[in-house]
Amino acid sequence: MTMPVTIIMVEDDEGHARLIEKNIRRAGVTNEILPFANGTSALAHLLGPDGSGRDNAGRPLLILLDLNLPDMTGVDILKIVKDNEHLRRAPVVILTTTDDQREIQRCYDLGCNVYITKPVNYEGFANAIRQLGLFFSVIQVPEAA
């Protein structure tokens, strides 16, 4: 039996967070979405009380990550997740306004799966999220060994 994928959304802009959730739902994705407004609380959840990430071992997660957070950068979080033996298989989708080519390349080098630049206009952003929703509905997150 496969467990449903939990979507971890790390986004400090409440308007963007609502928009992301609304469009994921619109695409027919009913998975649980856990929102975090900063990196500290997201990492506390992902790494668990002992900081090892063991609590989330084998749990199918998909991480939606903004790069510009109030307390740390999304790149720092990406590094921590991909360096963690229990979390490294979790797909990470970067959702950000940063379209700097070096930053994009850096995220892919660190192991992000998809990099989406948030269009400034609502319709473009909504559309990108809807496509992401369709992507979620077909994605199979690998089971932890």
Image (cartoon, rainbow, N blue to C red):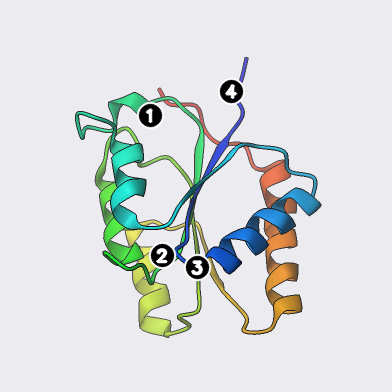
Q: Looking at this rendering, what residue extends furthest in the top direction? A: 1
Amino acid type at image mark 1: Asn
For label 4, the residue is: 3
Q: Residues within 10 Å of mark 4 (few under 14, many from 20)?
A: few
Instruction: Report the front residue among 111 and 134.
Output: 134
Quadrant housing residue 131: bottom right
26 above or below 124? above
Q: Quadrant of the C terminus?
A: top left
Residue drawn at x 65%, y 42% is 139
Foreground tag (3 vs 1): 3
Amino acid type at image mark 4: Met
Image x and y of residue 95, in percent = 52, 66
For label 3, the residue is: 13
Q: Residues within 10 Å of mark 3 (few under 14, many from 20)?
A: some
For label 1, the residue is: 56
Going from the N terminus, do you reach mark 4 or mark 2 first?
Answer: 4
Disc 1 element: helix
Image x and y of residue 109, in percent = 35, 64
CA–CA distance in space, label 4 to label 3: 29 Å
Going from the N terminus, do you reach mark 3 or mark 2 first?
Answer: 3
Disc 4 element: loop
| Badge 3 vs badge 2, beta-carbon distance below 8 Å | no
Foreground tag (4 vs 3): 3
Relative side of 22 to 95, left or right: right
Quadrant housing residue 70: bottom left
Residue drawn at x 41%, y 65% is 108
Image x and y of residue 105, in percent = 39, 74
